[in-house]
Structure formats: C-alpha cells, structure tokens
Image (spheres, rainbow, N blue to C red):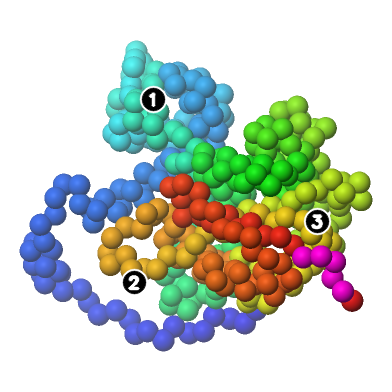
Amino acid sequence: MSPPPTPLRPEPLPKDLLREAEIARAIEFPPAAEELGLSSSYVYAQVLHALWDSGFYEYVRANPRFNRARAVEDLGFDGMTFDWLMYYLIGRGVVRAVTFASDAPRSDAPTHHPAELELTEKGRRVTNTIARGLLNLYVGGYNALLSNLGPLLRREIHLDDMRLDRSARHAAAGTEDVTCVRVVPQVVEVLKEHEVRGILDLGCGTGGFLIQWAHLAGGWGAGVDMSPGALAAARVNAASQGLQDRLSFFLGEVGKDSLPIDADVASRIDALTAMFMLHEFGRAGDPAIVRVLSALRAQFPGKLLLALEMQPVDVSALNGRPPPAMDALDYHFIHPLSRQGEPRPKDVWQRIYEEAGMKLLGVRRPRNSPLLIHVVRMGGAVVP
C-alpha cells in the first residue's frame, strides 16, 4: 500500500475566542438543546455499549437488582472501572443505589460506594434489543470508521485502509437485534404467503434469522457463511433451541463459484434470503451485483429470492426535518464510506434483477421501517 498523501490543508489559524464567545452568547440554548447534548450522547452511548458488549446486558436483565461486588466477580470486571460506569448511570437515571457499603469507600471508588443497585424504570426501558442493536451497529460495528473521519477527510489515511474496517461481529449482532422486533416477523409472513417451507439464508452469521424462521413458521432451513467462527456459533445456537435437526449450516462465500450445498439440501430449498448483503457487492458497481445474482440463478433456477435492503434517503427533501427513521440517515452516510456500496432505489434494483435474468415480483415495506423487502423470482436454467 502506498503511503498516505501529504495533507494539502494549511495549519489552522489561531482561534479568535473573543469572537467565538460573542457568537455563542447570541444563541439561546435551552437546557435540552441538541447542540449541548452532542458530547453527552456520545459518552452515554459508549458507556452503554461497553457494558452491554461485556456481558452486563444479559446479567442485568436476569438480575435487575444486583450486588455490586458479586456482579464484578461474576462478570470478571475491573472493579474501579465498573464503579465509575455505575456512577455515571446513576447520574443518567438508568440505575439507582439501593443500599450502601458499610465500610469506607476506596480512594479510587466513587464517593457514593453503593453495595446494591437496581435498574430504574428508565433503565428497564433502555435495556432492549433495539437500543442494543443500534449501539452494536454504530458504536461497535463502525467505531473505527467514525473515529477516523478526521484523518480520512484530511487524506492522512486511505478509504481502503484496513484500520477502517467494520467489526463484522458487532454489525451482524446489531442487525439481528434490530430486525427481530418487527422486520423478521413480516419477512416470515411474506415467505408463508408464497408457501415457502425450506429456505437458504445467504450470509447467515450466527443463525439468528434461521432460528426465528424455524420457530415462527415451523419451517426448515440452511445457512451459508464465510466465517467458521460464526457457523460454529450458529450450530451451538440452533442446538440450544432444539433445532439441530431442522437447521444446517455450510461454509462458503456468496459470489465465489457455486455454494457448497449438499444436493439433498438444495432439493428442499424453496427460497433464498439475503438480509442486507446484496448491496455489499455493489462496491465494485452494479455489474458485480448482477454477476452474483446470475451465479445464484444458475445454481437455484426458478427459486424465490427475498432480499432486504435499506431504501436511500433523499436529504434534500428533508429540509432539516429528521427522517422517519433516524438510523436510515446514519446507515446511508456510513455505508459508502465503509466500502459496502450505496443504498439503491427500487428502479435500480429492478434493472439489476432483470439483467441477472430475474423478475422483481414486488416490494414490501415493513411497517415503521426504512427497509424494503424485495420479492424476486429467479429465472429458469441459464442457457450456455
């Protein structure tokens, strides 16, 4: 990789703090102004993600009232760090102290030194899969990109620098967390409308969608993923739900030759599902997506394809108003910069499917969601 180019910008001029202060004094900031909450929202998100990514989410859901020392021991936490995280969440109204330690607080502990804590009503509300999923996606999945926007803008690093790569584990977990509430049940309904019994989930990750499919529809499924670690977790997750006989998993990479699916398994597949993955091939342009779809059509001719994609956000039409789902704007902003391809409108997807020998049967938009479900019929056998 060639070294980054020398930044072209000159050194910033010294600040005129008197003028800056004058401008700020002229602005009426209410106590809850968005401008004043920017940094606090950032700290709050980092605190919650650090705890939830370290086992505290499951722990506090099972133990809404917990002993501080026992939680530190059970979770293997650093005591001082945990104390200050709890101090912060007490201030945020997420947890509250129930009893206090009788001994004097350590010199490195917050002065309140609670012995027992519990989730507040606010804490119970915020401890949910949607909040966790969004933090997994953006704080966990894209932290490397977001924290390096300045160096990227100044051309100190390249967009293809591996240090900007997303955390696939967090991105996959976040997607599962967010979609399980409303999106997956509606995807299952679409599949049931088409009398689908067996599915192949492309890029199945740890098997979250397949497990929901098996429970909600009583269906059978297979998954393919390029990560051995994700597949190992998928098999454990399926077994823990008693689904090891109804779900199978295969190591393979979508877009690379034929998928390594057993013939008897392939014969039972009625539909393929692609959850937020087709656009990722679009980093090399629409023809790359067409090639992937053509390969899938060649291996599974005539099958149904359900593809979930985010619809693009027309920022000029917003005129400063928030989009119906704020994370749609975050998603559209982050994906091109993370080299995953830009969200595409319906007419572009229709052309892509047609060029791959497929037919877009319809587009379903889940309620209260910026997502789109593409229902596609893959054409017949490819003529040599």
Say what amino acid the circle numbered 3 marks: Gly
Q: Which residue is drawn at 85% across and 66% down?
A: 381
What is the secondary structure assignment of the residue under circle 2? helix
Distance in Å between CA atoms under marks 2 and 1: 41 Å
Sequence-first tag of 2 and 1: 1
**In this rendering, does residue 108 appear at all?**
no
Q: Is residue 237 above or below residue 291?
A: above
Q: Mark 2 points at which residue?
A: 316
Q: Name the residue under label 3.
A: 252
What is the secondary structure assignment of the residue under circle 3? loop
Q: In the rendered structure, which segment of residues is drawn in magenta?
A: 379-383
Q: Residue at x 54, y 67 (%)?
A: 346
Estimate how packed mark 3 is, as few (under 14), some (14 to 19) or many (20 or more) residues with alpha carbons within 10 Å: many
- Along the horizontal axis of the image, is 383 left or right of 165? right
- Residue 146 at x, y percent in the picture: 46, 61
- Along the horizontal axis of the image, is 365 left or right of 288? left
- Residue 260 at x, y percent in the picture: 86, 55
Q: Which residue is drawn at 63% across and 53% down?
A: 275
Quadrant occupied by the N terminus? bottom right
Residue 250 forms part of the magenta stretch? no
**In this rendering, does residue 61 appear at all?**
yes
Q: Nearer the viewer, residue 352 or 37?
A: 352
Q: In this view, does 194 lie above or below 252?
A: above
What label does residue 119 carry, if any?
Answer: 1
